[in-house]
Amino acid sequence: MNTDLRSLPTDGLVSVGEYAFYGTEISSVDTYCIETIGDYAFANCAYLSVAYIYITMSFSVKVPAK
């Protein structure tokens, strides 16, 4: 595990897996276009003080037939 990680690389990042940054020394997150964030992705990150995460959502709407 890389516990020296300080920032989140955002180029092309669309998903953060489970426990991806667990226990790292990441201090801030500023990213966009994230589709999913796994369980405990940022758990036990004692130095994480700021997180700007813009989540992209997609959904479909079903319209009842008349």
Image (tube, grey):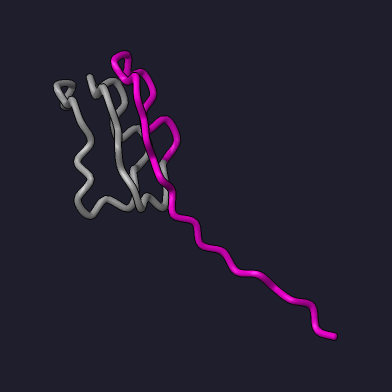
**Quarter where residue 39 is shown:** top left
Residue in view at x 32 percent, y 14 percent: 46
**Quarter where residue 43 is shown:** top left
Specify the farthest residue to the top.
Answer: 46
Q: In the picture provided, is 27 more to the left or to the right than 44?
A: left
Which stretch is magenta? 38-66
Specify the farthest residue to the right.
Answer: 66
**Is 40 located above or below residue 9 in the figure?**
above
| Residue 54, percent from left and from top | 40, 45
Residue in view at x 74 percent, y 76 percent: 63
Magenta residue check for 36: no
Q: Which quadrant: the C terminus? A: bottom right
Q: In the picture provided, is 50 more to the left or to the right than 6?
A: right
Considering the whole magenta stretch, tell me its main secondary structure.
loop
| Residue 33, percent from left and from top | 35, 53
Q: Which quadrant: the N terminus? A: top left
**Is 49 located above or below residue 60 in the figure?**
above
